[in-house]
Amino acid sequence: MVPSGQVAEKEVSEEPGPGPEPHSWRCLVFYLCFYGFMAQMRPGESFITPYLLGPDKNFTREQVTNEVIPVLSYSYLVVLVPVFLLTDYLRYKPVLLLQGLSYVCVWLLLLLGHSVLHMQLMEVCYSITMAARIAYSSYIFSLVRPARYQRMASYSRTAVLLGVFTSSVLGQLLVSVGQMSFSMLNYISLAFLTFSLVLALFLRRPKRSLFFNRSAPARGASPSELDQMHPAPDQPVRGKLGRALGACRDSFLAHMLWDLVGSARRPQLRLWSLWWVFNSAGYYLIVYYVHVLWNKVLITPSSTQVYNGAADAASTLLGAITSFAAGFVNIRWALWSKVVIASILAVQAGLVFLMTSTKDIWLCYAAYVLFRGAYQFLVPIATFQIASSLSKELCALVFGVNTFLATILKTTITLIVSDKRGLGLSVHCQFLIYCVYFLVLSVIFFLGAGLDGLRHCQRDRHQPLPLAQELRSPLEEKPGRLPSVEQGLGGIHPSAPPLPLEDCAEDGPGTLGPVAKA
């Protein structure tokens, strides 16, 4: 059981002062990281698509591609905002329990369901687990002072990454070495998920959250960043109408929306937010359907020849490495951002084309691993460029808006390209369209970079270039100012919506619903 100690009593203490008793908060953080690790232990996840298309379920490739997987995008769009708001309003723990129950429902439907409707319900349950990931990434920040945010974020991200990697390796070993059936692998996944649900029952429920449960600062406490930006008026407003208008004007959400409009004028914020929206949409479409593509490239009756778990483990490891390496890239981002983005997009387009055109499953695996690594390389850079000049509350709102817009775009593409009510294209045709999608984005960003270069040439040659914000080590940043780099619908900030972690490094194995994490 999680020790509570004196954490609850001291949560409202001032930030500069001493935090909770050291032994107590360390135990709480360790327990939460252990829970995060166990929640990722789903060794059957990498093999869901061959399980559905194999003799166990015997669905057709068209049913999985055009009827089952599209439901994930639709349901995720519906539940994303409500779950995000409930996470803060209910203070994390109830949403973590909802996530655990949804995971159990996913695998029960997977094991016991036999119709397309059952699999569609499975996708709905899985969309809830994806939307609820913000609860885990935010919960850990309620346990410590802001000065410890950076370290705590690294702990929680490491726990999730290690869980995804271990789960993929374990699943591959059980299939290739142990010759275990896909059905038995899913029963093992259900056992792990049931255990993680039990762990969630003993998590302590915090008394504070970022938006709806903002406790008043104690005597001598420093107010939040947003409170400092918008102090309360000195003179009270008289009259019912005046008080109502004043309440709307001074509301927390109104302040944040006003600040968001003002922040949208910053070029770097606009640029990287656009990358986040458009690239994330394409990235997750690839993650959703790549396992169907693998099943078409490699048609084999033997489960021991399927190495989906190895590919997922390798892509998770490479994503972690490239995310770490991005922290050491030191260039003038105000000048070279569009060139870097366009180059990465061109590489992604080439890798998607390779996955579509090759008949060699190992080349297809390698292209997918590199594709995910390229995306994860830019995620921490985009995180820094977006968050560097924002308050922590506004940062959460910006990442939330970006995620929501990316989900809308992804859902629209799914409806047109994948759904049987739209074009209902095969997986190969879909990947060709996604290749063109990334290629067009690359051309647009290259054109933008060229226009920027022409503007610089037309300026006074003696005028120095503006200084750009560089991607610095987290140790060089002011504690509590920047959100830590975490990818997913994972946790960029105590209140930011998840990014794949992996996926966000948490996107983990990518496949059908329960494997494609958004």
Image: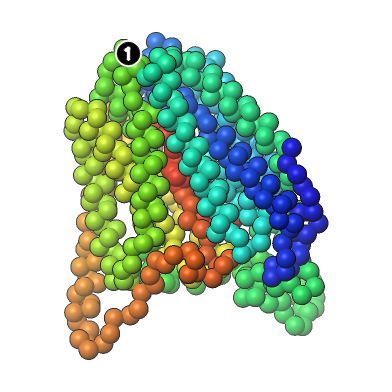
How would you rate the neighbour count of disc 1 (Cα within 10 Å): few for under 14, some for 14-19, many for 20 or more? few
Residue occupying image coordinates x 54% and y 18%? 187
Residue 82 picture location, percent across and down: 61, 46
Q: Nearer the viewer, residue 114 or 245?
A: 114
- Residue 82 appears in the rendering: no
Q: Is residue 393 above or below residue 457?
A: above
Q: Residue at label 1? A: 302
Residue 328 picture location, percent across and down: 36, 62
Q: Is residue 271 left or right of residue 482?
A: left
Q: Is residue 439 above or below residue 514?
A: below
Residue occupying image coordinates x 36% and y 57%? 326
* Colour style of the rendered protein structure: rainbow
Q: Quadrant of residue 365?
A: top left
Q: Nearer the viewer, residue 473 or 333?
A: 473
Q: Is residue 142 left or right of residue 13?
A: left
Q: Is residue 374 left or right of residue 474?
A: left
Q: Name the secondary structure under disc 1.
A: loop
Q: How many marks?
A: 1
Residue 358 picture location, percent across and down: 19, 31
- Residue 240 appears in the rendering: yes
- Looking at the image, which residue sits at the far front? 23
Q: Name the kind of residue labelled 1 in the image.
A: Ser
> Quarter holding the N terminus?
top right
Q: Is residue 85 above or below residue 294?
A: below
Residue occupying image coordinates x 47% and y 56%? 485
Q: Nearer the viewer, residue 420 or 486?
A: 486
Residue 329 picture location, percent across and down: 33, 63
Q: Is residue 473 left or right of residue 27?
A: left
Residue occupying image coordinates x 71% and y 35%? 201
Q: Nearer the viewer, residue 356 or 35?
A: 35
